[in-house]
Image (spheres, rainbow, N blue to C red):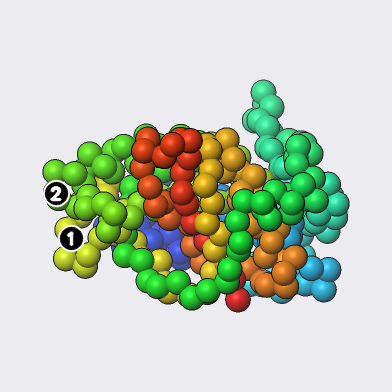
């Protein structure tokens, strides 16, 4: 007798060449949550991230339907269960305080939410951005990349880059400065617990490069991006991303679905001040 499982799980497990039950066990072991919880969480977090920067005339209903909820009611229940407050209250508090969301696990496993104000005010972020770079909106070409996925704090992705370099070096794929390194960031630290943040350490490659194991290929399609070029110390990355994310709605652009990424242009060890020269790229309409 076939035991009921969500249709999406049968489809995904077939692609992965596992039975649905074995796929479910592997998924839970690797990500420490069920596929269904993972999908719901990612949808809610994507909407939460948009709420922090949306204009007042953007409707929650449109966002809920866009990200796969069947109705505003099912979305509202899921959002309140996840964050402990309504989506409208989350948006109000997040935009007025420019706050950071951090989920804390209590001893009995229930989730709590704490709001902590950023050290930076909105005006400080605007002024800082003006001193650091001129942002331009432009069409970016397609990027073909080899990647290794990283889960956890973005500050620890360096270990994954080291692993990627050790794979790429013996294969003759590191031909700097033609070869570019890049980082793709799938979640916002403001709405996602650090342990569940997803990112990719990447290098640019040609089509004929073969990959296997934990190294895979990914393509960032060509498209319109808000791009800011920075010279940053390691402790300035968060401020740069917050400033760029604020710049988009402040200049009447709308964030679209796409890959939030960084493109690195130098060896930090050769910079006289030990800084990274990096483009921060945010997909916009």
The label shown at residue 113 is none
Instruction: Classify mark 1: helix, strand or loop.
Output: loop
Q: Residue 57 in the image: state x and y as whole percent.
A: 82, 73
Residue 168 shows in this picture: yes
Question: On the image, which quarter does residue 53 sit in?
Answer: bottom right
Instruction: Tell me what residue is drawn at x 38 percent, y 61 percent.
Output: 12
Q: CA gap, disc 2 to disc 1?
A: 9 Å
* Residue designated by label 2: 171
Which label is found at residue 209?
Answer: 1
Residue at the image position 66 percent from the left and 51 percent from the top = 131
The front one of 170 and 47 is 170
* Residue 271 percent coordinates (x, y): 41, 39
Q: State the residue in front, 91 or 31.
A: 91
Secondary structure beneath label 2: helix
Q: Quadrant of the C terminus?
A: bottom right
Image location (x, y in percent) of residue 111? 69, 36
Q: Nearer the viewer, residue 282 or 17?
A: 282
Q: Quadrant of the N terminus?
A: bottom left
Q: Earlier in the sequence, mark 2 or mark 1?
A: 2
Residue at 53%, 74% (x, y): give it. Answer: 138
Which residue sits furthest front?
272
């Amino acid at each position: 007798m076939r035991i009921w499982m969500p249709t999406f799980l049968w489809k995904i497990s077939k692609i992965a060449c596992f039975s649905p039950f074995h796929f479910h066990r592997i998924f839970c072991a690797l990500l420490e949550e069920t596929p269904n919880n993972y999908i719901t969480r990612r949808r809610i977090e994507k909407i939460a991230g948009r709420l922090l920067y949306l204009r007042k005339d953007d409707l929650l209903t449109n966002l809920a339907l866009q990200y796969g909820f069947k109705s505003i009611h099912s979305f509202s229940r899921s959002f309140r269960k996840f964050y402990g407050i309504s989506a409208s209250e989350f948006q109000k508090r997040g935009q007025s305080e420019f706050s950071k969301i951090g989920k804390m696990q209590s001893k009995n496993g229930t989730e709590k939410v704490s709001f902590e104000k950023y050290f930076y005010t909105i005006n400080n972020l605007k002024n800082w951005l003006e001193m650091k770079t001129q942002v331009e909106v432009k069409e970016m070409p397609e990027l073909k990349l080899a990647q290794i996925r990283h889960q956890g704090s973005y500050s620890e992705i360096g270990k994954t880059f080291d692993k990627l370099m050790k794979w790429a070096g013996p294969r003759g794929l590191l031909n700097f400065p033609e070869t570019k390194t890049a980082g793709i960031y799938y979640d916002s630290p403001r709405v996602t617990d650090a342990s569940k943040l997803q990112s990719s350490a990447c290098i640019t490659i040609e089509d004929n490069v073969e990959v296997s194991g934990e190294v895979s290929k990914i393509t960032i399609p060509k498209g319109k991006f808000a791009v800011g070029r920075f010279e940053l110390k390691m402790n300035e990355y968060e401020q740069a991303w917050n400033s760029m994310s604020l710049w988009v709605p402040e200049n009447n652009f709308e964030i679209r679905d796409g890959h939030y990424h960084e493109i690195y242009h130098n060896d930090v060890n050769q910079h006289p001040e030990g800084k990274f020269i990096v483009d921060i790229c945010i997909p916009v309409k």
